[in-house]
Amino acid sequence: MSHIGRFAPSPTGPLHSGSLVAALASYLDARAHDGRWLLRIEDIDPPREVPGATRSIIETLRAFGFEPDGDIVLQSTRLAAYQAAFERLQAQGLVYPCTCTRREIADSLQPPDAARLRHQERVYPGTCRHGSRTDRSARAWRIRVDEQVIDWHDRARNGPIRVELATRVGDFVLRRADGLWAYQLAVVVDDDWQGVTQIVRGEDLFESTARQIHLQQCLGLARPHYLHLPLVVDARGEKLSKQTGAPALDGRQADRAIEALDQALVHLGLRATQATTVSGFWRAAVEQWRRSRWMRDA
Ligand code: GLU
Ligand code: ZN
């Protein structure tokens, strides 16, 4: 089977040391398997988008020596495909309109580590499952989930990961009233369309994976392999992110780029290469990845 990996950043800010780890690991994994590596910009949430971020991410990756195979895909050009998938789910009777306000849902249970998770939603109590209020218009469309356990083998762990959909995730949003598509739906449609076989990304997307496997099952799509990486945290133990003000990376000076790449490599449990050129870094890093524990089960 051919190996196709990808990096799929949202343009909510420039590349930082947290997102670099996911970019680096997915790239090394693809190269170590003589596979392909795709770059997809997940620009489907204009209100959260930072002007110029798409260009800056692409330029920084290029300066760091990442070479995408094939064209860079922008999700903003793929809206018709998300609509088609949505309609297939609707035709199966799995989708319903929800009129609840954010406030109403806020009273319900929330997973303890929600603050560390990206794309996390509160577990929805199912209020509109059996018919929504007629005096309000829909705020979102949700997919129904059953008392079902999603399990997958994660390349980073021994033994299967099990997530109980109903209690940990609940009926989740596919589309908002303003017409915006949920990350969960878009990512599943595009990973399938691009033939992605390996998903390498941060642990903060763990519960998203359960949602995504559920969608793959409903849509009859193949399941890729997963590797969830340890998160980069700051001095206070908080996940580094654009929101917590992680500094942007700058690839304009080769020695700074290599230093950042080496740091990301060390975060993955590998040794700094101390290479003097970017191409030297990549040769040494791919070699290390090949002999590392991350290679297993791919
Ligand atoms: N675009 C998503 C994000 O940056 C991640 C996509 C993924 O790797 O699945 O949060
Ligand atoms: Zn509702």
Image (spheres, grey):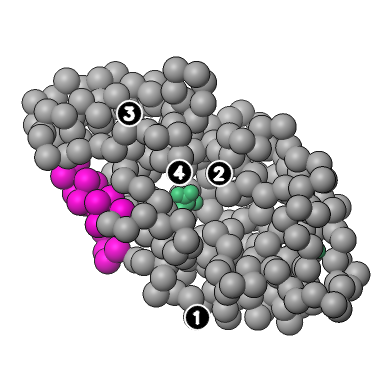
Q: For mark 4, what is the residue?
A: 200
Disc number at residue 118? 2
Asked if marks 2 and 4 touch (Cβ < 8 Å), the reply is no
Disc number at residue 264? 3
Q: In terms of secondary structure, where does tag 4 sit?
A: strand
Residue 188 higher or lower than 151, as above or below: below
Q: Is mark 2 within 8 Å of ligand 1?
A: yes
Disc number at residue 80? 1
Q: Which residues are magenta?
A: 53-72
Amino acid type shown at disc 2:
Arg
Residue 289 higher or lower than 143, as above or below: above
Q: Earlier in the sequence, mark 2 or mark 4?
A: 2
Residue 177 higher or lower than 294, as above or below: below
Asked if marks 1 and 2 touch (Cβ < 8 Å), the reply is no
**Residue 67 x, y percent position in the rendering:** 21, 51
Asked if marks 1 and 4 touch (Cβ < 8 Å), the reply is no
Amino acid type shown at disc 1:
Ala
Q: In terms of secondary structure, where does tag 1 sit?
A: helix
- CA gap between label 1 and label 2 equals 25 Å
**Left or right of residue 244: residue 59:** left
Name the residue located 50 percent from the left edge and 19 percent from the top edge: 236
